[in-house]
Amino acid sequence: MPQHSLEYDDRALSGHIDEKEREAYREPLAEAERLLVEKRGAGNDYLGWLELPTRQPADLLNEVVRTASHLREKADTMVCIGIGGSYLGTRAAVELLGPSFDDLRSPKILFAGHHLNSDYLSDLLKVLENREVTLNVISKSGTTTEPGVAFRVLRQWMEQRYGTEEAAARIVATTDPDKGALRNLARQEGYATLPIPPDIGGRFSVLTAVGLFPMAFAGINIEDLLSGAAEAAKQCTGAELEANPAARYAVNRNILFRRGLVIEVMATFQPHLHYLGEWWKQLAGESEGKQLTGLFPTVLDYTTDLHSVGQWMQEGLRNVFETLLVLSSTRKSLSVPAFSDNEDGLNYLAGKSLEEINNQACNGTLLAHLDGGVPVSTIRLADRTERSLGHFFYFFEKAIALSGYLLRVNPFNQPGVEAYKKNMFALLGKPGFEERFDELNRKMKGMGL
Ligand code: PA5
């Protein structure tokens, strides 16, 4: 039985990193931990997430649960409208904790506002026709284009279907407590609102109402989730590499990165873990990729991708290391049936559970990738429970914050995200972007576009 809901096992890195290298990180790590705890580092006005597991704002949980139960009385489906940190945590939770197929989920959480696509939204509206619907529109800034556009389409649909008053009673806006376009709209239309604390950025917001409210609607136990996060907060504290697994993971990835291994693959070994990987990818990529540095995080799903980019992982360019993400237990256990004909030659597996086979696929992959020159470590999540998920969220928030400070970047901003937005605004004719429009037009003509 594992001691914690999440365990970081880096024994297989022994051929790649020796203790002396980790020793050299003791002081920088201690400084990174001090910067976080004493709130003296870059982005120190965005550290509200550090205390969330133990210090939730008074009454927020009650409000979240009350609003969710009230809406469940009239709706069987929630559409979560948001992008980046405003939706990935909830998606990870629903995929990890719920049944494998949408058809088996009740109530249902569906997602919108994370891209710009008419076919997707049209199909979504079709699905909603036969369901009782509530919307949770989530945007801290209140001005993000993708969720803004999706909300317009869905709001119009809701108002046509339910009438303005009932539609408003079925819409909850999660946004800045005081300011922003969504806050103003919610005031004007009388939507219920939930706050996103000003001192918590999007990708660190999963344990605020951003994640807690839609999760509560989905029937996820948010108290257990927070107690898992509290377990991680307790475990992942201090600058002792032996005691703090988040710090050890942060140091290991920095050592490998400085050696030119700039890509970190999180390889999941169960399908329910895919969106945990996606959540981590956003957290790591947006926190660290700046000032011409930062690891490139990417997610692969095994064994599926072993039949795809598995070839590259085994024999491609050696600028990559791998963090395996595995579950120590599944909820069900199916075994391989025996057949007397044994035409497929698989009788040697008869009686073995799929997990026994998957475990050996995992061990086999770890050994093969080590042989192929890829450093591999493993994150083991105990099970598909709220507690394990809460531990996972906080573990990586802490690890990536430390890792960002070790890289000497501000892990809590995302200045680079603005570049595409400014161009898109100019090209779409947003007032105030006229000069840029002319400049971009000239560039595009120069390229023959
Ligand atoms: O981590 C972040 O800050 C971003 O990924 C945001 O969550 C994302 O851009 C959505 O922003 P907003 O909630 O303001 O719409």
Image (cartoon, rainbow, N blue to C red):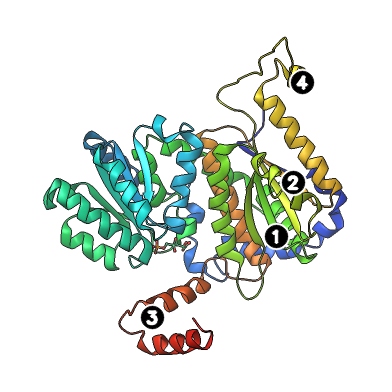
**Residue 428's image quarter?**
bottom left
Q: Please tell me how crowded label 3 is: few (under 14), some (14-19), or many (20+) other residues with Cα within 10 Å.
A: many
Report the residue marked by disc 4: 345
Report the residue marked by disc 2: 377
Image coordinates of residue 303 in percent, x first then y, are: 67, 39
> The residue under label 1 is which amino acid type?
Ile
Report the residue marked by disc 3: 426
Q: Please tell me how crowded label 1 is: few (under 14), some (14-19), or many (20+) other residues with Cα within 10 Å.
A: some
Quadrant containing the N terminus is: top right
Q: Residue at x 39, y 79 (%)?
A: 427
Q: Residue at x 39, y 90 (%)?
A: 435
Q: Sequence-wise, which precedes: disc 1 or disc 4?
A: 1
Q: Is residue 174 left or right of residue 308?
A: left
Q: Quadrant of ligand 1?
A: bottom left
Mark 3 vs mark 1, CA separation in Å: 33 Å
Image coordinates of residue 138 in percent, x first then y, are: 35, 56
Image coordinates of residue 316 in percent, x first then y, are: 78, 56
Query: From the viewer's perspective, is the residue at label 1 or at label 4 nearer?
Result: 4
Using the image, tell me which numbered label, if any, was put on residue 263. 1
Q: Residue at x 30, y 82 (%)?
A: 431
Q: Sequence-wise, which precedes: disc 4 or disc 2?
A: 4
> The residue under label 2 is which amino acid type?
Ser
Q: Can residue 59 be seen here?
A: no
